[in-house]
Image (cartoon, coloured by chain):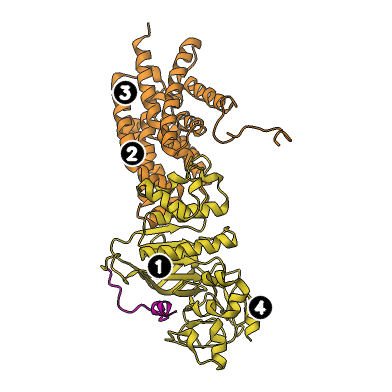
Amino acid sequence: MLDDFFIRALIAGVGLAITVGPLGCFVVWRRMAYFGDTMAHSALLGVALSLLLDLNLMVSVFLVAAMVSLLLLALQKRGGLSTDALLGILSHSSLSIGLVIVAFMTWVRIDLVGFLFGDILAVSEADIDLVWGGGILVLMALVMLWRPLLASTVNPEIAEAEGLNPERSRLLFMLLMALVIAIAMKIVGILLITSLLIIPAATARRFAASPEIMAVFASLIGAVSVVGGLFGSLHFDTPSGPSIVVAALVIFVLSLLPIGKRGREGTPFSPPGGHH
Amino acid sequence: MSEIDARLQTAPLPGPVAPRATPARSPGAALVTLREVGIRRSGRWLVRGVDFSVSRGEIVTLIGPNGSGKSTTAKTAIGVLKPDEGRVEKAGGLKVGYVPQKLAIDWTLPLTVERLMTLTGPLKSAEIAEALSSTGILHLARAEVQHLSGGEFQRALLARAIARRPDLLVLDEPVQGVDFSGEIALYDLIKTIRDRTGCGILLISHDLHVVMAETDTVICLNGHVCCRGTPQAVSQSPEYQRLFGVKAAQTLAVYNHDHDHTHLPDGRVLHADGSLTDHCHPEDGHHAGDHHPGSHHPGSHPPGSDRAQDTAAAAHVHDENCGCGHSQVRLKRLEPGKRDRA
């Protein structure tokens, strides 16, 4: 029989994977992997501030991640440094400021490894409610935002010209990302959130014929990764967060194998001179 | 010819027929009006003093050398860029269809031609099929856009823009990468769309001197409006038809014009008299020769007059207060046609 904590981990992990699948697709399409990383890293600053100011942890992480994304928007508008360099600055400085603040608070001891790599086996029923409640909220928002967000991903100028307000889509997308990071931090940890966003989406690309199908596949592949990773961690006694990422990676690598390959290189290979 | 003449509009301004609240559907109404629009970036004016409008059923073509602000002007007209001076007036409820100059779709985004059609709004499958077959790519409906050739992709973008039945179609170099016969076919299609739906069309030509013959107004930009006019007379000329064939002459026209100043790589402007300025001015003109403010029938000048000889080729009206010198920069194609006439 499986223990209760393991069942809770499965339920929370699958809920999270389903939530991040479609968001991860947009992260891949919009080439925002590093941006996701930056927001995730800033979560540690959120943790530090929540301890310092006695705020709710999730609220604090959400606020800091949202602030960092707004700061990035402002800095991009100002021009000068490339987005890449700005992200590098924001990412590591927010992480470091978080660590420095924690070091000043000699009266608290935090489980740094838990925040960096997550502790899915410690999720409570309240956490499950949060993951599924927040997940449904995020997915509903994404469904409503789908057309303008996809249009502005393809080309913000077309979206603007045809009345779909790409700026608003982008802002709302960033807020959704901040929300997902706040939810996901406890489960896969700050350093591994981006992998759960990107690896299932990248895997889904090969099998998807439309953006919508790719989003659904990314959710499913993420869910399979969570289940596989958790059972793997149980079997091999490995840390659960990294095991989930390894499982996702295994599926990605399998998807690269030319078994049952279809679509892109769908035409059968004909040897030279083989047709007359 | 009389039908074309009826549409001729060579006056630089549309007059007071463009109140902001005009519904975009009423016939002949100005869809978008730019008034003394300027766009400034990093302390330099990309365009300034741009002043024109596009009405229902009208085809306006923007031409000009590289960096003359064609795309900037088009983007300002549809609200992608906000003017730093002047203003843009749009008809109420204006529905725009836009084909940008450049569009790269990341390989990671699985997007078929069919799915691209409904990017910004829902469409019935019959509407999608109609738009795709009118641009000649119905057979590519299920192809991924990343696998299309440049010309096919342009057709897909055009199909997407027309499928939503816009009031105003803005096409930034819509025939780039399309072969010559395809170019003529697409220009025919653009004309057909205008005739059938009565939408206004703002077209940016990728060629400095060749424009669609059905164009009602050609606007030459060079950081400002250099000149404007109609290309009809040229496409009707026998020399042109000999050069390009009758079919091409029905579709394309030469718009002859010369520039009296050059935009230097550092952004400054070298004028015909040798002087340098930081940017060009709205009152800068651009070419040698004729001056016909208010001329509505550029092709109907008395034959034999020196001026008519020139006018046949350069059927356009100058900016007022031009007073510019003679051309220093002659960027010219189709020299043979011109020489034949001279």
Is residue B10 part of the magenta span, yes or no?
Answer: yes
Residue ranking furthest to the left: B21
Taking A10 as reference, is A40 above or below it? Answer: below
Is-magenta flag for residue B71? no
Task: State the quadrant of the C terminus of chain B.
Answer: bottom right
Q: Position of residue A122 (x, y in %)?
A: 37, 17
Q: Colour of chain A?
A: orange
Which tag is nearer the camera, tag 3 or tag 2?
2
Amino acid type, residue under disc 1 in the picture: Asp
Task: Give the numbered dot on residue B336.
Answer: 4
Upstream in the sequence, badge 3 or badge 2? 3
- State whether residue B244 is above or below residue A108: below
Which residue is at 49% across, 84% downward? B299
Q: Which residue lies most toward the right here?
A: A273
Rounded to the nearest whole Å, what is the CA distance between mark 2 and mark 4?
A: 59 Å
Subunit under mark 1? B
Determine the main secondary structure of the stretch shown in magenta.
Answer: loop
Tell me if mark 4 has few (under 14), some (14-19) or many (20+) residues whose alpha carbon lies within 10 angstroms of its own: few
The magenta stretch is B1-20
| Chain B, colour shown | yellow
Mark 2 element type:
helix
Is label 3 in a helix, a strand or a loop? helix
Residue situated in front as seen by the camera: B21 or A232: B21
Q: Which mark is residue A143?
A: 2
